[in-house]
Image (cartoon, coloured by chain):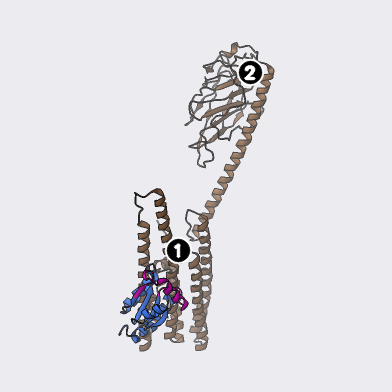
Chain colours: A blue, B brown
Amino acid sequence: MDRVRELASKKAAVIFTKSSCYMCHSITQLFYELGASPAVHELDKDAYGREMEWALRSMGCNPSVPAVFIGGKFVGSSKDVISLHVDGSLKQMLMDAKAIWF
Amino acid sequence: MIVVLFTRIGNQIGKLHHTKYKLQIIQEAGQGKGSSLHHEENINAEGSTIDSFRVSDFGAFDQSYRVEDAVDLSGNSTYNSLKVSNQTISPVSVHISNLGQLPTSLEKSQLTIQTEPHRLQLQKVQSSNPGTILVVNTDNQEESAMADASPRTDISTDLDTDDKNQPYDRNLSVVAVSDSSDRSKDKSDQKTLRRLAQNREAARKSRLRKKAYVQQLESSRLKLTQLEQELQRARQQGIFISSSGDQAHTLSGNGAMQFDAEYARWLEEQNRQINELRAAVNSHASDTELRMIVDGILAHYDEIFRLKGVAAKADVFHLLSGMWKTPAERCFLWLGGFRSSEILKLLVSQLEPLTEQQLMGITNLQQSSQQAEDALSQGMDALQQSLAETLSTGAPASSGSSGNVANYMGQMAMAMGKLGTLEGFIRQADNLRQQTLQQMHRILTTRQSARALLAIHDYFSRLRALSSLWLARPRD
């Protein structure tokens, strides 16, 4: 959990993924398209990956990946991100966190 | 006199493809006397045996007979049974022709000629063709065809192969064999009787076996036609049916059919609601009334997305295939449904007048849905590519067979895991559609929303009508 928080606060947009997760690929692509350059951490390549996944799950992230943090705050998984994107909130969050400027 | 000609080729039974051969035994009116029957060894009347003879004509047969019944003869083996009905009585010769797999001559057959008139038995025939047997049994008291359904290459009756020269009964008018005409009738009655009884037994058993076999064939054929009809009917309903038909597929097929039924019901209900909305709009109903109907229609959209979620668990490929939609709709299929960005593009022109803010809102919405669609498509592409890579990795030739199997199973397990993520993609695609509709409703006024929903419905119903027209178009 600490490691999750630590990594999440390091950059404006942070996404936790797994290399085998293709939905993670989609969400990451969406961020790139918006002009944000998120920090992507692959849990299956991390030494503490399993504990981090457990921590994400306990935060209510289901499925555990992709897990999106903007401005250090937990946003949600793919469903939440898409919903926020459609109603324009995602862009606003990114702007507020200075991940993007327009 | 009834001659039953029974042929069996090979060891296998039960192929459903038959080619029919007609065995014709042509009668030639011989003069009856004299030896028109050629044989290589002694022919003994009354139960004695002939080791081989050539069946060209049985000149001495006093009765004529004819093989009438067509015979089912498979490529591998079947049992051919011919029924010969008692026709006329005249001297007869037997000629077996047109047997693709049967020899035109019987060799090494054993012919027993009975003393009693109208009785001819051919036992233990071995042909030069491996596994081909001709058994000729005549018995004027029995009419049914005799066939041996057992998978033996030989049919041997229980007769003793009596090599002793048996006398030939001069009362026998059935077969005239040159040698046998000189024999005396020394054979004991007891032996003859026993042999006759055994023959009858064997014949009876053969008949019963053949009956059972034929019944089995008939029922299988019936079942096959039934299944074909069912398949035809199901295909017409546009349900995708694979040819494998294994258990697992049957289960998923049920999920698909169930969803198709639910979708049909959903469409009906939507038509009803849209008609209600159209009537309200045309009659300039109040905003509150309109809002009620619009909310109802949006809730109804939520319902189909929920149903699709359930169906995605049961049969994701059915949803992805779009077979539950009409052909023209299928043409525009994206991740198991419509593209929200396309719909919004269509609506902008129809929704005017829009305020500045509304126009911007709709444009942004269109752009957002486009971006989300692109992102999901890219994820799908990555999945497809990865799946292809997984399945195309060949096992190195040097590893042992067990290594190959483990490799293959590992491949499959990985591929299975990847396929499992498809459901997630359909889920998010439907989520996108649902969110887009909700957001659109938020941006527009009630009346505009009503017009938008009507426009969306009209567009899809025209696509469906186009599909029907296309399917019904005259073709040369």
Q: Which labelled disc corresponds to residue B438?
A: none
Task: Name which residue type carries label 1.
Answer: Phe
Visible residue check, residue B269: yes
Tag 2, which chain? B
Instruction: Please identify the quadrant where the N terminus of chain B is shown.
Output: top right
Quadrant where the C terminus of chain B lies? bottom left
Q: Identify the residue at image location x=48%, y=25%.
A: B128
Residue B198 placed where, x, y %? Answer: 65, 26
Q: Position of residue B290 (x, y in %)?
A: 50, 85
Q: Is residue A57 magenta?
A: yes
Q: Compared with residue B135, is residue A58 higher up or lower down, i.e. above or below?
A: below
As displayed, is residue A48 above or below residue B236? below
Say which of B389 and B168 sits in front.
Answer: B389
Q: Secondary structure at mark 2?
A: loop
Tell me if I can see residue B353 in this picture: no
B40 drawn magenta: no
Badge 2: residue crowd in 10 Å (few <14, some 14–19, many ≥20): many
The image quadrant of residue B183 is top right
- Residue at image mark 2: B46
Percent x, y for residue B231?
A: 51, 55
Point out residue B47 in the picture as x, y percentages from the top left corner. Answer: 62, 19
Kind of residue at badge 2: Glu
At horizontal 37% and vertical 88% (from top left) the residue drawn is: B357
Q: Residue at x 66, y 29 (%)?
A: B201
Q: Residue at x 38, y 57 (%)?
A: B391
Range shown magenta: A40-66
Q: Earlier in the sequence, mark 1 or mark 2?
A: 2
Q: Chain of mark 1?
A: B
Residue B300 or residue B287, whichever sits in front: B300
